[in-house]
Image (cartoon, rainbow, N blue to C red):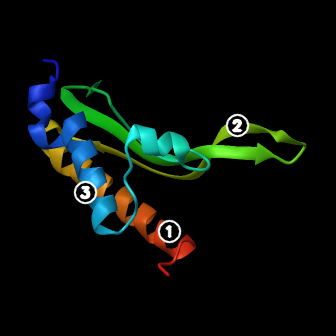
Amino acid sequence: PGLNRDDLGAEISPESIQTYVEMRLRVAGIPVVTEEEWLKTPGSPFLYLHFELYQANVGPVIIYPHSMSLKMMQEVILVGDSDRKVPAVTWEKSIMGCVGQQAIPENVRAAREGLMDRFINDYLAANPKK
């Protein structure tokens, strides 16, 4: 049997993950901006959370390998061509796992929370509040 979105639970839908990420950033005092504000922000930084889930049959057992990565992307200036800005990953962490179907929602939540904790800690360490 295949796995559909309803099996994963509403709390790990793309919309709920975005809401969670934005809430965690706001609580930590990290700016969450509109698209218009983002276009005016130097470097146009943004967070990108990517989640992949696969189904694999191992004999009679069905397992679900998955990975989640969180990246901070922004424009950077090349050393060899200071007139050129290119998008680059300036921070990235990933988590991989393999679970049974019943454990998928909890593992996705734990991965999301762990990645956000690491990002917030690193961001605040690099950008101390004044």
The disc placed on residue 86 is: 2
Residue 55 lies in quadrant:
top left
123 left or right, relative to 24: right
Task: Inspect this view and state whether residue 114 appears.
Answer: no
Q: Residue most toward the top?
A: 1
The secondary element bearing badge 3 is classed as: helix
Is disc 3 surrounded by few (<14), some (14 to 19) or many (20+) residues within 10 Å?
some
Q: Nearer the viewer, mark 2 or mark 1?
A: 2
Q: Separation of disc 2 and disc 1 at Cα?
A: 23 Å
The mark that comes first in sequence, 3 or 1, is 3
Q: Nearer the viewer, residue 16 or 5?
A: 16
Q: Is residue 103 above or below residue 126?
A: above
Q: Residue at x 50, y 68 (%)?
A: 122
In this rendering, the answer to whether 58 lies above or below 78 is above
Can residue 60 be seen here? The reply is yes
- Amino acid type assigned to the residue bearing label 2 in the image: Val
Q: Amino acid at mark 1?
A: Asp
Residue 63: x %, y % from top left: 24, 34
What's the residue at 25%, 35% (across, down)? 14
What SS does tag 2 mark?
A: strand
> 56 or 10, which is in the foreground?
10
| Quarter in which the N terminus is drawn | top left
Label 3: which residue?
A: 23
Q: Mark 1 = which residue?
A: 122
Residue 3 spot, x, y in % from top left = 16, 23
Q: Which residue is rendered at x = 16% and y = 18% of the image?
A: 2
Q: Real-space Cα distance between discs 2 and 3?
A: 29 Å
